[in-house]
Amino acid sequence: MRYGLLTAAFAASVAFTTASHATELEVTHWWTSGGEAAGVAEFARAFEEAGHTWIDGAIAGGGPTARSVFVSRLLGGDPMGATQFNHGRQAEELVEAGLFRDLTEIAEEDGWRDIVNPPSLLDGCTLDGRIYCAPINIHSWQWLWLSNQAFEDAGVDVPTNWDEFVEAAPALREAGKVPLALGSQSWQAAGLFQVLMVGLGGPDVFNQVYGDKDAEFSAGEEVARVFAAADDAREMSRGSNAVEWQQATNLVISGDAGGQIMGDWAQGDFQAAGLVAGDDYSCLPGLGVHDVIATGGDAFYFPVLDDAEKSDAQLELARIMLSPETQVAFNLKKGSLPVRGDVDLEAANDCMKKGLEILAAGNTVPAVEQVLSQDTVTQINDLMTEFFNSEMTAEDAQAQFATIISQAD
């Protein structure tokens, strides 16, 4: 079964009326690392300040594990009060089944079309002209995080692009470092591959493969370069001995690994560990080759409930999540970018500012989940898992990839 996906701005300060009766609302999500927990705590604080009770429903193991739990509960008639999904088509069939609330009325009242940037985020919440989710952040995969200490220990300069990183790998190995930290979960290898696709190939290659679903192009020379880089990444990641992405990130934080390709949510863990961007770690958006980010991220859906008080609290939570104050507080802790284009992020660190500059310049591509069905995403994930855990050649992997694209929906 596929689990696909969705005027006036708020005033500078938004006052929420304290409810006469505190309402408990269970909120399910997969944010369990240090930076993630710090971010979600800002949502919980704001919701409770409005007079309600946040019941935290965190599921460990990352998005794929958590989503299977969420879907099972929803289909089994055990809905939560609100639940996280990524922007895109992950919840599409659940919306079609009538399991999620239509938020169009409050979206229009509060001018979401005017404040959500880029507009594609709200488009991802929209089905048949109706809005079914609240986008809350922009998370981009296109980052290479580097340990300044690891490169100093290896006696080489901190790389400024992917090719320099590959060239530094032997020196890192000799110094006892893992060049590229990578967890063993399938989505991590697949995410790394997608970063190589847009970082090395650029937006045109990314869009021709995933937007146009051009199988012939996917089997060609430009995409072959991406698979050659994936082969390099496979060799550089040997010895990571990590499962969760947080474990791989900790290898970079400790200086035991040279770098990690991971979304900007990793930055929340760097901050939670007390590291300073530019001093302790460096970041290369688009692998230092193409300054581009994907406009993926997280959105919250609100199941249909047979409880008037909880239903009212759901709408209040949606509004709180998109308020200026909460957007700033949450995203500064989470390491993501706000979906609102009208908030002040002067407190952002150097890496977040790079992301904001790229976003402001419009150098973006959609997240893979926004243009491919969950079935197709899963097939690519499975292929990358096999590739990174076997001796499959880059040529064979590319041929299988082109077949998947030829059948993509």
Image (spheres, rainbow, N blue to C red):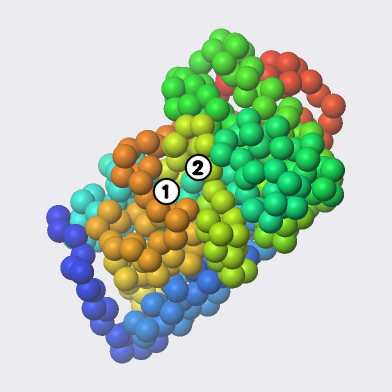
Looking at the rendered structure, the secondary structure element under dot 1 is: helix
Which corner quadrant holds the N terminus? top right
Pointer 2 or 1: first along the chain = 2
Q: Which amino acid does label 2 sit on?
A: Pro
Task: Specify whether residue 298 is in view.
Answer: no
Give the alpha-carbon distance from disc 2 to disc 1, as whole Å: 8 Å
Look at 51% across and 32% down and name the residue there: 289
Q: Does 344 appear above or below 87?
A: below
In the rendered image, the residue lying farthest to the left is 7
Q: Does 97 appear above or below 202?
A: below
Look at 71% across and 37% down and name the residue there: 168
In the rendered image, the residue lying farthest to the bottom is 20
> Badges 2 and 1: C-beta atoms under 8 Å apart?
yes
Q: Which of 268 and 104 is in front in this view?
A: 268
Residue 380 position within the rendered picture, expressed as x and y whole percent measured from the top left:
64, 31
Residue 186 position within the rendered picture, expressed as x and y whole percent measured from the top left:
71, 42
Compared across the picture, whether 318 is left or right of 241 comes to: left
Q: Which mark is residue 355?
A: 1
Q: Name the residue under label 2.
A: 285
Looking at the rendered structure, the secondary structure element under dot 2 is: strand
Q: Which amino acid does label 1 sit on?
A: Gly
Q: Residue 322 carries which label?
A: none
Residue 146 position within the rendered picture, expressed as x and y whole percent measured from the top left:
63, 49
- Quarter of image, res 45: bottom left
**Neighbourhood count class around disc 2 (C-alpha, 10 Å): few under 14, some 14–19, many 20 upward:** many
Residue 105 position within the rendered picture, expressed as x and y whole percent measured from the top left:
23, 58
Look at 44% across and 37% down and name the residue there: 292
Look at 59% across and 44% down and name the residue there: 144
Compared across the picture, whether 368 is left or right of 317 comes to: right
